[in-house]
Image (spheres, rainbow, N blue to C red):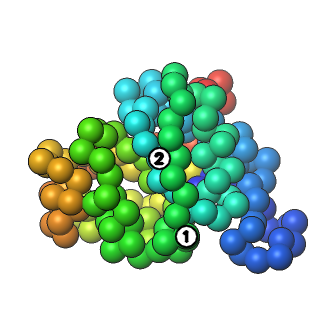
Amino acid sequence: MRHAKSSWGSEPASDHKRPLNGRGQRDAPRVAGRLVELGWQPQLIVSSNATRTKETCRCMRDAWSQDVPVEYSRQLYHGVPGDLFGVVAGFPAQIETALAVGHNPGWQEAVMQMCGQYVVMKTATAALLERAADDWPSAVDGTSNWTLLDVINPRDLAEDSS
C-alpha cells in the first residue's frame, strides 16, 4: 500500500517529516475497512519510518479486529523494490498476510515486478497480491509469480466504508 495523501502546505523540516492531510486521514481507515471486508487483515505491517507512512498506519489501526504489530524501517523510505523484498524476506514463517506501507515510485515498481502488471499506485492505493510459497524468502525470489487479485483505491470506496 502506498501511504495516504500527505500535506504539502505545512512546510515540514524535511520530506521525511511531511504529515498526512485531511483527505489522507479520511482515506486510510476507509482502505483498512475494505481490507477487513475482503478478509485481508494483516498479521504484520512493515512501513517506512516517514511521518506520513506512520500516520497512515495509525489511521488504519481502528479498522483491525486485533492489534497488528507494526515495524518501521528507514530502508523502506523511498526504497526500491529490492529494499522491500529484503524486508519481506525476513518475515516470520507463521505470517500469512502482511501489509507493506511505503512510497512511489518504489511501490509501483515492486507491484510490476511481483505480478507483471502495471498498477498506478496513487496515494492510499493497496494492491492485493497473492503467491503460494514455502517461506517469505521464496515468495520474493525475484520471479513475477504473484497474482494481482484486486486494487483498492479510496476514490472507488463509498464514504461510509470504514
Residue of label 1: 74
Give amino acid for label 2: Ile
Query: In the depicted view, which residue is nearer to us: 129 or 41?
Result: 41
Q: Residue at x 37, y 27 (%)?
A: 39
- Residue 101 vs 16, above or below: the answer is above
List x then y, in percent, for residue 97: 33, 39
Horizontally, residue 99 falls left or right of residue 142, namely right
Badge 2 marks a residue whose secondary structure is: strand
Judge whether residue 157 can be spotted in this image.
no
Residue name at image x 78 percent, y 53 percent? 21
Left or right: 17 as drawn, with respect to 40: right
Q: Is residue 68 visible?
A: yes
Q: Is residue 155 left or right of residue 100?
A: right
Residue 25, horizontal then vertical, whole percent: 72, 44
Cβ–Cβ under 8 Å for marks 1 and 2? no
Hey, what amino acid is under mark 1?
Arg
Task: Report which residue position mark 2 lands on.
Answer: 45
In space, the residues marked 1 and 2 are separated at their CA atoms by 14 Å
Give coordinates of residue 63: x percent, y percent. 58, 28
Q: Is residue 45 above or below residue 106?
A: above
Mark 1 element type? helix
Q: Residue furthest right?
A: 10
Closest to the observer: 67 or 31? 67
Label 2: how many Cα within 10 Å (few below 14, some 14–19, many 20+): some
* Left-right relation of 119 to 10: left
Using the rendered view, name the quadrant where residue 62 is placed: top right
As drawn, 20 above or below 109:
above
Query: Looking at the image, which residue is at 76% across and 77% down?
Result: 14
Q: Quadrant of the C terminus?
A: top right
Q: Earlier in the sequence, mark 1 or mark 2?
A: 2
